[in-house]
Amino acid sequence: MAYLRSKSDLPSWFQGWVSSGIADVRRSPRARRIRVVADDLGVHLVVPSRVGLGLALGFLESNRPWVDRHANVAVARRATLESWRGYRMLEGERSPFDGDIAGLRKECASALKNLVASEADRTGLQPTVVALRAMRTRWGSCSSGGRVCLNWRLGMAPERVRRYVVIHELAHLKQGDHSSRFWALVHRWWPEWQMDKAWLREHGWLVANLPHR
Ligand SMILES: [Zn+2]
């Protein structure tokens, strides 16, 4: 087993991703095993605090194709994001933006609240509370107490995509899991949901990172 004294002993191909700001190493007291995770704009090597960095060497080598693939996606996304500087998304389209984030957040939040109110009326599924938040990894959530929480940035997505997410969360008021019964409920209120789910898979990372300053 190779022994790493420091992060600079990581393989040079990975070091390359680190020095270009695409990848980093995170020592975690809570992690139970070495893993690599990708988020919207980068790749993270997570190593449990109690595990020697040396064990990461073999792990990285055997996961190199995965790491390279996700790092390359992150590079392309960062370039796309850069091209959005000075813009917001409006109904899914690029639109000039020179306002402040607080104002944009207010605008998005009120549009989403209106949509929840009208969809709650249409479906008869009434949340107890509707909250708008900055969420890192999700578009929405629904607690067992009937509290629906939405990511305010969703307000920049196309109207139909917003509607899909709202109906998704309202359907959780009846069905907490993602079982076939749950998807049947979504389908009943929004038959074309699959198109919107696919849109989010492709463009969600961009919405989540706008406006880019
Ligand atoms: Zn869900």
Image (tube, rainbow, N blue to C red):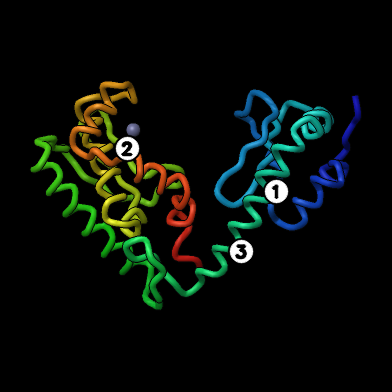
Name the residue type under label 1.
Ala
User: Nearer the observer, disc 2 or disc 3?
Assistant: 3
CA neighbours of label 3 inside 10 A, class few (<14), some (14 to 19), many (20+): few
Q: Position of residue 87 (x, y in %)?
A: 44, 72
The residue indicated by pointer 3 is 79
Name the residue type under label 2.
Ser
Tag 1–tag 3 contact (CB < 8 Å): no
Which numbered disc covers residue 23? 1
The reply, left or right, for residue 93 in relation to residue 147 is right
Q: Position of residue 20 (x, y in %)?
A: 74, 58
Q: Residue at x 67, y 31 (%)?
A: 35
Q: Position of residue 159 (x, y in %)?
A: 27, 55
Question: Circle 2 — which element?
Answer: strand
Q: Residue at x 83, y 33 (%)?
A: 57
Eyeballing the image, is 120 above or below 56? below
Question: Circle 3 — which element?
Answer: helix
